[in-house]
C-alpha cells in the first residue's frame, strides 16, 4: 500500500490540488450562503473551513494506531477522495433543508447544525493536509509551501470558474479537483484500485459540472438552488452567477403593474398608472426593477414623484453621476427630468449585461442614448481617479445585502458610507453641486437617517466647512428618506424650491437650514449628540470612517440580545446581523472546545503537553496572529482596491503565495540551528509587520487615486514581505517540535487550527467594536507572544525530547 515515507512529485501535486479545491470551496461558500441564507451568515465560511480542518488534525492525533506513518500515503489518497464525495453530499444536504433563523435556542441550534454539516468535508481535507505536513518532517518546508501555493491559486480560480459556471456547478467542479488530487496520492501510494476509483469519480463529477453549467447558461440547470432564505424558489426567467453575486430576473413582461418602489409621493395614483416591469434580484434579497421603455418619456412620469429623485428639481439640466445603476431606474429618472448628461456606475458587470443586452429590448437600450454612459467600476475608486466634476452625485438605496467572498471577513462594511468617501464625493462636485443618498426611513426614529445626518456633518467638517447645517437637507415619505448635501450652502431659492416641491408631493421636510422636524436631526447636523433618543440612546449613530466602515451596524456587541432595542424594522435587521456574529462566536468557541480542545487534552500525556507548553502557546499565537493580520489587511484593502473581490484575490493570493515562499526558504534550516534561525526570523517578522502595518494607512491614502494596476502592485508590495516572514513561523515551529516529540506535531497543528477558527470570528468582532486597526495590532501582539514562546521553547533545549504520547 505504501511506497515508503518519502513524498515524491505526485504527492506534491495531490497536495496542491487538495488545498486548491479546499480554498475554492471555502470561497464559494460565502456566495452560496448569501443566497440560501442571509448575507450576514456568509462570513462564517472561513471559520467553518478552519473548524473542519482542525477537527481533521485532531483525528490524526487522536488515532495514531490507525493513521500510521507506514500508511500515510494511502490515507492521504483515501481522505482526499472522501473529501471530494463529502463536498457533494454536504452541499446537497444544505440545499435540501430550508434555513430559518430566529433569536432563540432553535435559532442557535439551526446555526450550529448548518455549521457542522458544512464543516464535514473540511474534516477530511484537514486529515489530508495534516498527514502531509506532519508525516514527512524532513520535507515540511516544501510541503507547507505547496499547501499555501495551492491555496493561493484556489483564491484566483474561483473568480474564473464563476465566469463560466453557476454556483452549484462550481461546487461540483471543486469536488472533481479534490478527487483528482486523490488520484495522484493513490498513484504515489501504489494503491491501484483506489486510484481507479478516484479517477472515475473525478471524471463523473467533471462531466456533471460541465453539463450542468451548460444547462444553466440556457436557464435549465438540473442542480440549482431551491430553498432560498427559508422559502421554495421557483425557476426564474434569467439567472447568472459571478464571483460576488447571483442575479435573477422574474415576473411577467406583458402584465402591467403598479410601479415598484417605496419612495413615491402619496399624491401619485399608483393603482391607476400601471407599467410593465420585471424584477431583478441580487442574492435573493436586494431588488430593483427593469422598466419597459420605448423612448417615450411619458412612460417614466412616475419617477418624477419619487423622493429619491428630489435632487433633480434643484439642479435641472445638469451633469449627473449615478452610483449603482442597478436595473436602470436612476438612469431613466435622470432622462425623465431632462438632465444634460448622465454617467452610471455599476460594479456588477452581469447587471449591466442583463439590463443593456439580455433585456435591452425591454428596457429601451438606455446605453444607446447619446448623452448616457455606463461604466463597469466601483464608484468610490472611479470617482477618486476621475478628473471630472459633477452637478449631482446620486446614490439611491445602495446596499445589496449580498456577501462577497471578502464580505465573509468583514460583515456588512460598505466603503460608500464613510466620512472619507463622502469627502471624496463632495470634492468632485462643482461649487453648487449636490450629493444625495436615499435610505430607509421607517417610523419616527429611523437610525439610518440619523447616521446619514452624522455622516454629512462629519464630511463637511473635514472639508473645513464652518457651518455644515446650512449645507444639509433631508426629506422623506412614509418609507424612504433622502439627504441632500450641498458643496456650498443652500441658497434661499434652493430652500424655497425644497419647500415648494415637498408641499406639492406630500413629502416631509425632516431637516433643512430653516428648521427640523426632529430635534435629534438638528443636533446631529450641528455636531451635537442628541439627548432625546430614549431607548435608542445606546446605539452607535456616529459617522462611520474607513477604520470602522460599518454603516449598517449601529448596535454594539453587548446589545446583541437586548430585546428592548428592537423597536423599528431597521434596528431589527441590524440586530439580526449582530446577533449572528455574537451567536457564531459562542458556537465557534463551544464547538472548538468540544471537538478540538477536549479531545486533545484527553488524548495527550499531561507531562508531554506541560513540557510542550511554550510550543503550544507558540502555535496558538501564530494561528491568532496570522488570521488577525490577514483579515484586517483585507478590510483595509477593500476600500483601497475598489471592490471586495479585488481585496479577496489580492490579499489571499499575495499572503498565501508569499507565505508559501517563506516556508520554502526555511528548507535549509536544520534541527541543530532551528533555535537561532527561528529567533532571527521571528524578530525580523515583528519589525516588518509592525512597520508595514503602521505605514499602510498613509500609503493607501497616497495612492488612492492611482490606476487599478498601480493600486494592486502597491497592495502586493505591502503584503508580500508580511506573508514571506509569517510563512516561516509554522515550519520553524514544526521543525523545533519534531526534534523533541514528533508525536505531538498533530496536537500543535490542531491547536494552531483551533485558534485560527476563533480568530476568524474574533477579528470581525474586534473590528466592529474597536476598529480595523485594533484588529491588526492585536495580531501584532500575538506575534510578540509567539516570538517570546519560541525563545522559551528552544532556549538550551537542542537535542532534548519530550516524552512520547501514551
Image: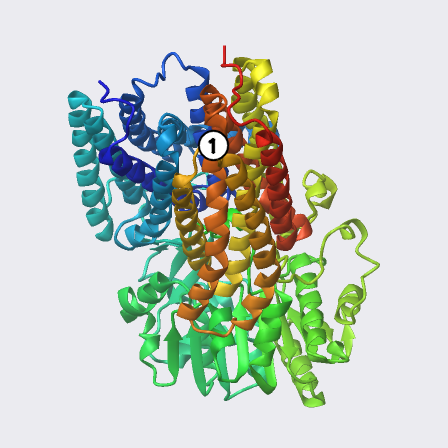
Mark 1: give few (<14), some (14-19) or many (20+) Cα within 10 Å. few
Q: Position of residue 103 (x, y in %)?
A: 62, 35
How many discs appear?
1
Task: Please name the residue shown 23% across and 52% down the image.
Answer: 217
Task: Please name the residue shown 24% across and 29% down the image.
Answer: 185
Q: Is residue 167 left or right of residue 298?
A: left
- Viewer-side residue, 515 vs 531: 531
Quarter of the image where one finds residue 713: bottom left
Q: Is residue 795 left or right of residue 231?
A: right
Q: Helix, strand, or loop for circle 1?
A: loop
Q: Quadrant of the N terminus?
A: top left
Q: Is residue 638 left or right of residue 560?
A: left
Please determine whether, in this image, residue 164 is positioned above or below residue 485: above
Please determine whether, in this image, residue 332 is positioned above or below residue 721: below
Please determine whether, in this image, residue 743 is positioned above or below residue 255: above
Q: Position of residue 544 (x, y in %)?
A: 65, 61
Residue that numbered label 1 is attached to: 672
Task: Please name the residue shown 50% across and 30% down the image.
Answer: 736
Quarter of the image where one finds residue 542: bottom right
Q: Is residue 520 visible?
A: yes
Extreme residue in the right direction: 531
Task: Please name the residue shown 42% across and 59% down the image.
Answer: 646
Which color mode does the image show?
rainbow
- Viewer-side residue, 259 vs 690: 690
Q: Position of residue 322 (x, y in %)?
A: 48, 74
- Viewer-side residue, 548 vs 62: 62
Q: Position of residue 453 (x, y in %)?
A: 69, 67
Q: Is residue 267 visible?
A: no
Amino acid at each position: 500500500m505504501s511506497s515508503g515515507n518519502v513524498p515524491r512529485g505526485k504527492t506534491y501535486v495531490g497536495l496542491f490540488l487538495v488545498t486548491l479545491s479546499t480554498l475554492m470551496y471555502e470561497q464559494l461558500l460565502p456566495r452560496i450562503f448569501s443566497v440560501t441564507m442571509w448575507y450576514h451568515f456568509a462570513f462564517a465560511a472561513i471559520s467553518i473551513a478552519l473548524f473542519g480542518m482542525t477537527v481533521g488534525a485532531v483525528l490524526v492525533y487522536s488515532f495514531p494506531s490507525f493513521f500510521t506513518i507506514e500508511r500515510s500515503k494511502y490515507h492521504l489518497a483515501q481522505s482526499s477522495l472522501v473529501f471530494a464525495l463529502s463536498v457533494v453530499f454536504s452541499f446537497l444536504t444544505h440545499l435540501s433543508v430550508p434555513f430559518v433563523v430566529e433569536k432563540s435556542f432553535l435559532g442557535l441550534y439551526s446555526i450550529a447544525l448548518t455549521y457542522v454539516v458544512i464543516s464535514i468535508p473540511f474534516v477530511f481535507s484537514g486529515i489530508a493536509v495534516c498527514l502531509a505536513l506532519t508525516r514527512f518532517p524532513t520535507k515540511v518546508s516544501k510541503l507547507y509551501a505547496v499547501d499555501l501555493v495551492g491555496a493561493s491559486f484556489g483564491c484566483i480560480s474561483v473568480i474564473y470558474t464563476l465566469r463560466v459556471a453557476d454556483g452549484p456547478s462550481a461546487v461540483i467542479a471543486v469536488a472533481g479537483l479534490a478527487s483528482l488530487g486523490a488520484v495522484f496520492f493513490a498513484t504515489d501510494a501504489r494503491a491501484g484500485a483506489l486510484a481507479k476509483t478516484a479517477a472515475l469519480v473525478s471524471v463523473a463529477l467533471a462531466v456533471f459540472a460541465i453539463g450542468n453549467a451548460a444547462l444553466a447558461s440556457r436557464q435549465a440547470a438540473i442542480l440549482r438552488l431551491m430553498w432560498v432564505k427559508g422559502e421554495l424558489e421557483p425557476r426564474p426567467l434569467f439567472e447568472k452567477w459571478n464571483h460576488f453575486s447571483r442575479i435573477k430576473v422574474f415576473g411577467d413582461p406583458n402584465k402591467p403593474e403598479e410601479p415598484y418602489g417605496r419612495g413615491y409621493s402619496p399624491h401619485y395614483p399608483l393603482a391607476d398608472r400601471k407599467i410593465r416591469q420585471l424584477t431583478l434580484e441580487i442574492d435573493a434579497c436586494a431588488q430593483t426593477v427593469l422598466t419597459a421603455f420605448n423612448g417615450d418619456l411619458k412612460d417614466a412620469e412616475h419617477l418624477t414623484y419619487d423622493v429619491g429623485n428630489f435632487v433633480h428639481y434643484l439642479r435641472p439640466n445638469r451633469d449627473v453621476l449615478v452610483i449603482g445603476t442597478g436595473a436602470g431606474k436612476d438612469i431613466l429618472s435622470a432622462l425623465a427630468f431632462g438632465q444634460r448628461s448622465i454617467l452610471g456606475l455599476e460594479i456588477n458587470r452581469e447587471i449591466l449585461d442583463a439590463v443593456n443586452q439580455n433585456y435591452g429590448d425591454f428596457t429601451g437600450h438606455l446605453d444607446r442614448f447619446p448623452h448616457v454612459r455606463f461604466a463597469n467600476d466601483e464608484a468610490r475608486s472611479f470617482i477618486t481617479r476621475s478628473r471630472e466634476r459633477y452637478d449631482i452625485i446620486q446614490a439611491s438605496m445602495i446596499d445589496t445585502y449580498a456577501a462577497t467572498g471578502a464580505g465573509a471577513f468583514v460583515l456588512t462594511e460598505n466603503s460608500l458610507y464613510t466620512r472619507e468617501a463622502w469627502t471624496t464625493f463632495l470634492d468632485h462636485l462643482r461649487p453648487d453641486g449636490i450629493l444625495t443618498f436615499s435610505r430607509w426611513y421607517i417610523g419616527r426614529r429611523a437610525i439610518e437617517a440619523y447616521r446619514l445626518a452624522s455622516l454629512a456633518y462629519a464630511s463637511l467638517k473635514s472639508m473645513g466647512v464652518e457651518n455644515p447645517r446650512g449645507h444639509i437637507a433631508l426629506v422623506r415619505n412614509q418609507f424612504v428618506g433622502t439627504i441632500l448635501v450641498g458643496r456650498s450652502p443652500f441658497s434661499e431659492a434652493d430652500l424655497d424650491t425644497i419647500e415648494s416641491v415637498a408641499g406639492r408631493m406630500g413629502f416631509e421636510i425632516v431637516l433643512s437650514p430653516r428648521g427640523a422636524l426632529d430635534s435629534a436631526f438638528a443636533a446631529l447636523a450641528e455636531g451635537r449628540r442628541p439627548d432625546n433618543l430614549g431607548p435608542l440612546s445606546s446605539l452607535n449613530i456616529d459617522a462611520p470612517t474607513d477604520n470602522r466602515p460599518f454603516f449598517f451596524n449601529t448596535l454594539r456587541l453587548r446589545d446583541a440580545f437586548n430585546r428592548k432595542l428592537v423597536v423599528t424594522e431597521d434596528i431589527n435587521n441590524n440586530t439580526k446581523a449582530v446577533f449572528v456574529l455574537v451567536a457564531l462566536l459562542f458556537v465557534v468557541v463551544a464547538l472548538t472546545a468540544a471537538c478540538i480542545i477536549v479531545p486533545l487534552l484527553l488524548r495527550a500525556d499531561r507531562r508531554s503537553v506541560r513540557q510542550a507548553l511554550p510550543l503550544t502557546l507558540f502555535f496558538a499565537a501564530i494561528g491568532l496572529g496570522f488570521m488577525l493580520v490577514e483579515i484586517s489587511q483585507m478590510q483595509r484593502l477593500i476600500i483601497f482596491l475598489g471592490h471586495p473581490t479585488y481585496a479577496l484575490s489580492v490579499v489571499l493570493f499575495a499572503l498565501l503565495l508569499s507565505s508559501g515562499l517563506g516556508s520554502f526558504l526555511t528548507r535549509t534550516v536544520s534541527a541543530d540551528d532551528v533555535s537561532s534561525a527561528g529567533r532571527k526570523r521571528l524578530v525580523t517578522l515583528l519589525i516588518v509587520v509592525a512597520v508595514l502595518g503602521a505605514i499602510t494607512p498613509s500609503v493607501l491614502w497616497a495612492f488612492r487615486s492611482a490606476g487599478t494596476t498601480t493600486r494592486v502592485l502597491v497592495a502586493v508590495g505591502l503584503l508580500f514581505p508580511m506573508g514571506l516572514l509569517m510563512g516561516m513561523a509554522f515550519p520553524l515551529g514544526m521543525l523545533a517540535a519534531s526534534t523533541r516529540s514528533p508525536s505531538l506535531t498533530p496536537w500543535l497543528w490542531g491547536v494552531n487550527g483551533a485558534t485560527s477558527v476563533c480568530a476568524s470570528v474574533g477579528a470581525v468582532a474586534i473590528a466592529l467594536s474597536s476598529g480595523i486597526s485594533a484588529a491588526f495590532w492585536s495580531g501584532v501582539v500575538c506575534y510578540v507572544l509567539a516570538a517570546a514562546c519560541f525563545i522559551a521553547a528552544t532556549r538550551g533545549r537542542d537535542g532534548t525530547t519530550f516524552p512520547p504520547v501514551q
